[in-house]
Amino acid sequence: LLDLAVNQGVTAVAYEGMPQQLRERMPKDIAVRWHLSIEYIVERYQKQCKVLKELTDIYSKQGIDVLVLKGVHLSALYPTPQYRECGDIDIFLYQHYDAGNKIVESMGMRVRRLGLKHSNFHFKGVNVENHKTLLNVKANRFDKNLERELHGFLSRGKRDEFHLLFNIRHKIVHFLSSGLVLRHLCDLYLEITNYKPDFTEVFDILHREK
């Protein structure tokens, strides 16, 4: 069960949902491994949140708004946010992509510009992806169309619709490339039950773009 939870990206979430009776019957060596894994996940999350706040404050002083994407954003939907395993910190700076990179470079950090979609840098030991575009608009017309719809949601202040459409597209990419894990399905469930979007508008877009 522990190995399955690790492979599916729900190590801490699975333990949280486990009946107390099963926890008490767990062999000591497995219990220790599980607790150590959870401690690592929580410490990593706390460090990411601290770094994100510092980076957001730096950008804010320069008049740059930060939109947080994917894992760290989704963690707020979980009963215990620090139990949602997160990889990189993904941010979108609207029209300030280049300015955001230059600010980081002026602080002595190396910025790697990875193609046309995003740049990458390490801020205090945490990997950050600064998105120039939300989707891979140069790859296909579907992403180009969805990018336009996503910007439309942002311009109209429809954040729930934005995040739901963006994350569904992100999960589709995962499904086609490497497959989905249970963490992705937990995310989707929590988005649908916690967001208050216009589902009709979101699903009409998905249907139209096939």
Image (tube, rainbow, N blue to C red):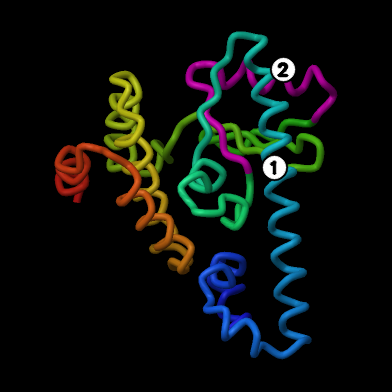
At numbered mark 2, what does the secondary structure look like: helix, strand or loop? helix
Residue 48, numbered circle: 1
Q: Which residues are magenta?
A: 89-109
Q: Is residue 91 left or right of residue 42?
A: left
For label 2, the crowd category at 10 Å Cα-Cα, with few meaning under 14, some 14 to 19 and many 20 or more, is some
Q: Is residue 157 above or below residue 172?
A: above
Q: Residue at position x 77%, y 69% from top?
A: 36
Principal secondary structure, stretch drawn in magenta: helix
Q: Position of residue 30 (x, y in %)?
A: 72, 84
Q: Is residue 206 above or below residue 12?
A: above
Q: Residue at position x 56%, y 80% from top?
A: 4
Q: Is residue 14 above or below residue 82?
A: below
Q: Which numbered disc, 2 or 1, marks the residue closer to the eye?
A: 1
Residue 9, numbered circle: none
Q: Give the residue number, with chain letter if any, for mark 2.
A: 103
Between residues 184 and 144, which one lies in front from this camera angle? 184
At numbered mark 1, what does the secondary structure look like: helix, strand or loop? helix
Q: Amino acid at mark 2?
A: Ile
Q: CA distance from mark 2 to mark 1?
A: 19 Å
Q: Position of residue 182 (x, y in %)?
A: 46, 68
Q: Amino acid at mark 1?
A: Gln
Between residues 67 and 106, which one lies in front from this camera angle? 67
Q: Residue furthest right?
A: 108
Task: Decide whether residue 148 is among the magenta residues.
Answer: no
